[in-house]
Image (spheres, rainbow, N blue to C red):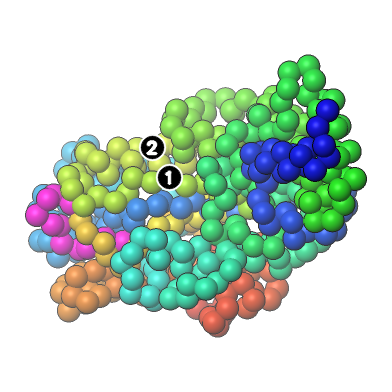
Amino acid sequence: MISRRVFLARGGLAMVSLGFAPSFLARTVRAAPDRRRRQLLVAIFQRGAVDGLNVVVPFGEQAYYQERPGIAIPAPGRGDQSALSLDGFFGFHPRLAPLQPLWQSHSLAIVHACGSPDSTRSHFDAQDFMETATPGVKTTSDGWLNRCLQAERDPGRSPLRAVALAPTLPRTLEGGAPALTLNNVDRFGLHAGPLSSNLTEAFEAEYAAAGGPMGTAADDGFEAMKLMAAANPAQYTPAAGVEYPSSPFGRALQQVAQLARADVGLEIAFAELGGWDTHVNQGSAAGQLAGRLDDFGRSLAAFTRDLGSRFADTVILTMSEFGRTVKENGNGGTDHGHGNAMLVIGGPVKGGKVYGRWPGLAVDQRYEGRDLAVTTDFRDVFAEIAVRHLGIGNASPIFPGFTVRPDHFPGFLA
C-alpha cells in the first residue's frame, strides 16, 4: 500500500509518460466526444532549414546555375538525375518523383519565395517564430495551431482532435487547448500485462477523487484512452500497395493515417523530420539532401494513398524555418538564407500550380544580396488554411499583430 499523495504524484508522472501535455490542465469541460468526421490538417515541419531552391528548382533562372556550379540540379531532359519539370520554369528534385502524380492530378500546390518578414538566421528563433506565427516576438505563450483549436471550444470535440507524432509536444501545439504527443499509437494506454484493466480503473478512481485540474486532466486522458481502444487503430493495415519507408518520419505518417482512418475525431496532426541543415556536402541529384528528400517524398506519397477517402478532406502543409543562400559555399553546401518553398497537398487543394510572386535570383533581386527574397508572408499561407480549410470565421486572434486579409491569401484553396 502507498499513500494517496504518493500514488497521485506517481500517477502524474505516468500521465506525462503517456504523452499528456500540460495544456490538459487548462481544460475544465467534460463531455462525450463528437467523432463526426471533420476537416483534417497535417502540419509537417522540416527542421534545419531545407534548401527550397533544390527542392523546387527554378531551372528557368540562369543565375541559379551560375551560383551553384557544384550542387545545382540539371535542367529537365538531361537524364534521370535532372529536374522533373512542373510548369516549364520550376521542377522537382528527381528524388521527389513519388510526388509528381499529385502535381499532375492537381492535388499538390507550391508556394515559393515564402517565409518570415523577420531577418533572423537563428534556427531556434525562426522555428519559434514560425510555430507561434509571431515573427520577431519571443514572448508569445502559445502556438498558432493551438490557437486554431482554441477558436472552436466545442465541448463535444474529441480528446484526440490534436495529436503530435513527435518525441515532445511541438511549440505550435502548446497552449490552452488540449493536445497529445504520442510516440506509438498502438501502445497508447497503461500497460501492466493482465493487470492493465485493474490498473487503469485504479488510476481513474484515484484521479477522480483528487478533483481539481489534475482530476480534469486525468479525465480527459482516460477518455482519450477509451476512445482509442474502441477505435482499435491497431487493427489497421496500410491500403493495398502502400509501403511506407521504415524511417521515423515514415512511421509517424503511418500512425497519422491510422488515427485518421479510425475516425477518432482527429482534426490537427503534426509530424517533423530533421537533417536539413546542409552546410557541407549537400550534394545535387545525389548526396545528403537527396537522401532526406527520398524519405520525405516516399513517406508523403504513401501517406496520401493510405488516407483513402480521408484525402478528400485533408490538407497537408510542409514548412521549414527559412531557406538557404542562393550561392553555394566553399564546402559544397549552402548557408542560412531567407525565402523558401512550402508544399500544400490534399483533396481541397487547387494544385498543379506554383503560387506566389517569383522575385528572381539576380544579385539585385535577392534579400540582402544573398538570399531568395520573401514575397509571401508565411502567415498568409497559415491564415488561408485556418479560414478556408478549418472554417475559422474570425482568424484575427490566431495571428496577433497581423492583419488577416483574404485578398492576400495565395489562393491554393477554393
Q: Residue 148's x, y, as percent?
A: 65, 64
Q: On the rendered structure, is 14 left or right of 336? A: right
Identify residue type, mark 2: Asp
Identify residue for label 2.
295
**Mark 2 element type:** helix
Q: Residue 239's x, y, as percent?
A: 59, 28
Name which quarter of the figure residue 24 lies in. bottom right
Q: Residue 75's x, y, as percent?
A: 19, 51
Q: Quadrant of the N terminus?
A: top right
Identify residue type, mark 1: Leu
Residue drawn at point x = 21 percent, y = 46 percent: 282
Image mark for residue 367: none
**Mark 1 element type:** strand
Which one is in front, 123 or 265?
123
Residue drawn at point x = 77 percent, y = 31 percent: 229
C-alpha distance separating marks 1 and 2: 10 Å
Identify residue for label 1.
273
Magenta range: 323-333
Name which quarter of the figure residue 237 lies in. top right
Residue drawn at point x = 24 percent, y = 69 percent: 371
Q: Are marks 1 and 2 in contact (CB under 8 Å)?
A: yes
Q: Is residue 329 magenta?
A: yes
Mark 1 packing: few (<14 Cα in 10 Å), some, or many (20+)? Answer: some
